[in-house]
Image (cartoon, grey):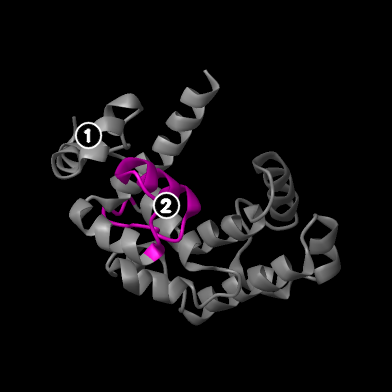
Amino acid sequence: MNPAEAHLVSVCPGMAAFVPRHEPFPEKFKRSADPYQALVRAVVFQQLSGKAAQTILGRVVAQFDPPFPKPEALVKAREPKLREAGLSRQKIAALKDIAAKRIEGVIPTARTLAKLSDEDIIERLTAARGVGRWTVQMYLIFSLGRPDVFPVDDLGVRKGAGKMVGRDLTVQELAAYGERWAPYRSAAAWHCWRAVDTVTLDAAS
């Protein structure tokens, strides 16, 4: 058991019951950390299935010099061409704003971003149109490998935590309860998601 999970099961009976039932939280991530590229992908993928989003992203990328659209080129790109790739007007506006904020320095390089705190990163990246707190939290967990990110507004996290404590939790209650899981709240979120999956599978079997 890794240090994160050892801590979680030691402070929470619910974690002790659920953690052994599924795969552990990954200790290492392949850090594709460029925030500009990550946010462009995140916006394209919003409200779409993975396959459809990947197809649209491929069409968008193919309109630019490889391997990925430069911010300057994306800002200048004509809307009709991007619409042909399958993007909505709202997503086009969001992508152009992300590109503009990269040019302005609001969205920094990965090297600069790595020096910032989680909350500073959330503040910087959510300045871009179409980028919410949840999107940045997923980036912090799964791209930057930050260990203590807790997306309390995520429905899956709330449902999983409710299974562990035996009752539904408000956002405020979950935030307070989750303090005991620090400094490994990214792993706690992972196990809350897995708890929902586990319960669903158990009910179907």
Instruction: Say if 134 sits above or below 13 in the image.
Output: below
State the residue position of label 2. Answer: 158
Quadrant in the picture for the N terminus: top left
* Whole-percent x, y for residue 52 in the image: 73, 44
Residue depicted at x 35% and y 27%: 22
Of helix, strand and loop, which one carries label 2? helix
| Secondary structure beneath label 1 | helix
For this rendering, which residue is in front, 21 or 190? 21
Residue 188 located left or right of residue 108: left
| Tag 1: amino acid | Ala
Q: In the displayed image of the protein, which residue is found farthest to the front?
A: 167
- Residue range highlighted in magenta: 145-171
Image position of 97 (left or right of 155): right
- Label 2, label 1: how many angstroms apart (C-alpha)? 17 Å
Residue pictured at 21% horizontal, 38% vertical: 13
Percent x, y for residue 88? Answer: 78, 63
